[in-house]
Image: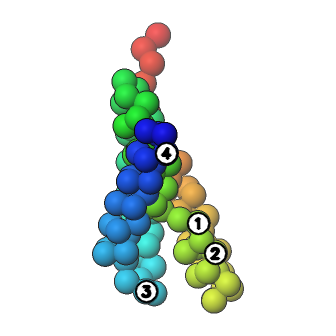
């Protein structure tokens, strides 16, 4: 029950931050907030492993509420252009690059 409450609170906070920072039709802010969610999830996943409750509050909760694929899907459905397709793949590429940079290096 604690985990469900942690996810719900984190999700509510992430959704509020998204709502307050991204105005309708602002693709740049949408891109930035999605990358910010990847950064939050990556930092928590790679750097903070002590508290399972904190992890579920921040990864599926906050980062999940902050980012959403549905916004990108709606953008694509509304415009259906090469620009939107490029936007989608650029978001994936930047997300993977950010996770690569955040991931701790293992020394041999």
Instruction: Decide: few, some or many residues near mark 2? Use Cα within 10 Å; few <14, some 14-19, many ≥20.
Output: few
Q: Is residue 3 above or below residue 20?
A: above
Q: Secondary structure at mark 1?
A: helix
Mark pair 1, 2: CA separation = 6 Å
Q: Secondary structure at mark 3?
A: loop
First along the sequence among labels 3 and 4 = 4
Residue receiving disc 1: 69
Q: Between tags 2 and 4, which lies in front? A: 4
The answer to which of 108 and 66 lies nearer the viewer is: 66
- Residue drawn at (43%, 86%), measured in percent from left and top? 24
Q: Secondary structure at mark 2?
A: helix
Is residue 45 in sight in this rendering?
Answer: yes
Picture disc at residue 73? 2
First along the sequence among labels 2 and 3 = 3
Q: Between tags 4 and 1, which lies in front? A: 4
Instruction: Decide: few, some or many residues near mark 4? Use Cα within 10 Å; few <14, some 14-19, many ≥20.
Output: few
- Looking at the image, how many numbered discs can be counted on the residues? 4
First along the sequence among labels 2 and 4 = 4
Q: Secondary structure at mark 4?
A: helix
Check whether the beta carbons of the residues at disc 1 and disc 2 lie within 8 A of each other: yes
Mark pair 4, 1: CA separation = 22 Å
- Residue drawn at (43%, 39%), measured in percent from left and top? 2
Residue 100 at x, y percent in the picture: 48, 40
Residue receiving disc 3: 24
Residue receiving disc 4: 4
């Amino acid at each position: 029950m604690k985990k469900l409450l942690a996810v719900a609170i984190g999700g509510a906070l992430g959704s509020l931050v998204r709502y307050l920072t991204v105005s309708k039709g602002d693709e740049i802010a949408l891109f930035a907030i999605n990358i910010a969610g990847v950064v939050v999830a990556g930092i928590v996943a790679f750097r903070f492993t002590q508290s399972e409750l904190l992890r579920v509050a921040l990864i599926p909760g906050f980062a999940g509420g902050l980012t959403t694929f549905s916004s990108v899907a709606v953008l694509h459905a509304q415009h259906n252009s090469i620009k939107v397709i490029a936007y989608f793949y650029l978001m994936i590429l930047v997300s993977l690059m950010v996770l690569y940079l955040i991931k701790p290096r293992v020394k041999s």
